[in-house]
Image: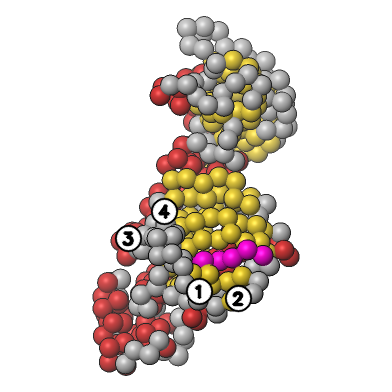
Amino acid sequence: METGSATGPAAALDCRVDHREVELRLEVPTGRRLAIVGPNGAGKSTALALLAGHLRPDSGQVRLHGGTVSSPGLHVPAHRRRVASLEQRPGLFPHLSALDNVAYGPRARGVRRRSALDRARAELEAVGCAGLADRRPHELSGGQAQRVALARALAVDPELVLLDEPLAALDVEVAPGIRRLLADRLTGRTVVMVTHDPMDLWALADDVVVVAGGRVVQSGTVETVLSRPGSDFAARLAGVSLVEGTVVDDDELRTPGGDAVTGYRPDAESGEVPGWVTGSRAIATVDPRAVAVHADGFAPRDLSSPRNAWPARVVGLAPSGALTRVTTELRDGQRLDAEVTSRSAAELALAPGVDVTLVVKAAQVALYPRG
């Protein structure tokens, strides 16, 4: 590995993989936990493979702790990187006990057997599996196996931990406990994770990058990205709908379909908002719980409370007990979700193809300049 500045990021990608049409630029400061999110095929797995050493870039470089580990003319193999991975499947060696599985990494790095076993016992204790040391993987539950896999990953003192949706294959009853364990054991470590679950973002990540089409399209802290999503995917993670348009007034944008969207600008409380000028691109975020669905042609008459009224067409329904998530399309094809009671959905005879009017108070629509 080439040596470099010790003051640089713990991990960095500035490279391209031609056959995947992926070009990624991102940095992970030492001790920070970065989540990579985006739709399927966006480049998330490519990022992990580049960092792990399973993939080599066609141009640019991959750097770990200031040193280049991969470029067109250099490639440090995976086994020579201080990188540990935890994936959906634990991947434990079936012929080894839990204890020997955890001790395998230190032993492979030249640690004496007794010291490696001592370290393995300590790591099993830390993940609550000390009593499972003698069991083989087939004797472990899914949650137990994932705990052992975490112990194995950390037993080698990795400089970087990669998480590839490690909770995705677990039962919903088990996942929260493993999530809490990960949050505790990964505190202070440098982590890059891929996830589709917003709970993972809030519990495990400090920062987020959103990738789409093989490029980073948004980055920031978890709170910043989820409070001000810049893409439909990030909006869905945040649980809101995203509507795009152009600025027409201090508190209004207009969609390509001609709908006026009136709201408030959270950024304006701290002074002038850069980028909010007539004709510039802007976005509005809308919480589905704030959207009322009415029969087509409804017009709000409560003038004391400014409201938006948008014609739309139902394209999908997702009932969940007493509530139903209604997905609609505005006149320009942009999608906006509403959450209504299942009783209301039935009374309105909502179904794909039904025309409706969506009503939202202006005070519940947040407006931002498009970054």
Separation of marks 2 and 3 at Cα, in angstroms: 32 Å
Q: Residue at x 30, y 76 (%)?
A: 123
Q: Nearer the viewer, mark 2 or mark 3?
A: 2
Separation of marks 4 and 2 at Cα, in angstroms: 31 Å
Q: Nearer the viewer, residue 195 or 307?
A: 195
Name the spot of residue 243 as percent of width and height, x first.
61, 30
Q: Amino acid at mark 4?
A: Ala
In the displayed structure image, the side of residue 46 where residue 354 appears, left or right: right
Neighbor class of circle 2 (other Cα within 10 Å; few <14, some 14-19, many 20+) is some
Q: Nearer the viewer, mark 4 or mark 2?
A: 2
Q: Residue at x 48, y 50 (%)?
A: 208
In the displayed structure image, the side of residue 319 where residue 304 appears, left or right: left
Neighbor class of circle 4 (other Cα within 10 Å; few <14, some 14-19, many 20+) is many
Mark 3 touches mark 1? (CB < 8 Å): no
Q: Nearer the viewer, mark 3 or mark 1?
A: 1
Separation of marks 3 and 1 at Cα, in angstroms: 28 Å
Neighbor class of circle 3 (other Cα within 10 Å; few <14, some 14-19, many 20+) is some
Mark 1 touches mark 2? (CB < 8 Å): yes
Q: Residue at x 53, y 70 (%)?
A: 68
| Residue that mark 1 sits on | 2
Residue 151 forms part of the magenta stretch: no
Assign a secondary structure to mark 2.
Answer: strand
Q: Amino acid at mark 3?
A: Thr
| Residue that mark 4 sits on | 205
Name the spot of residue 167 as percent of width and height, x first.
46, 62
The image shows residue 177, relative to residue 366, as above or below, that is below
Assign a secondary structure to mark 4.
Answer: loop
| Residue that mark 2 sits on | 74
Separation of marks 1 and 2 at Cα, in angstroms: 9 Å
Q: Which residues are magenta?
A: 59-64
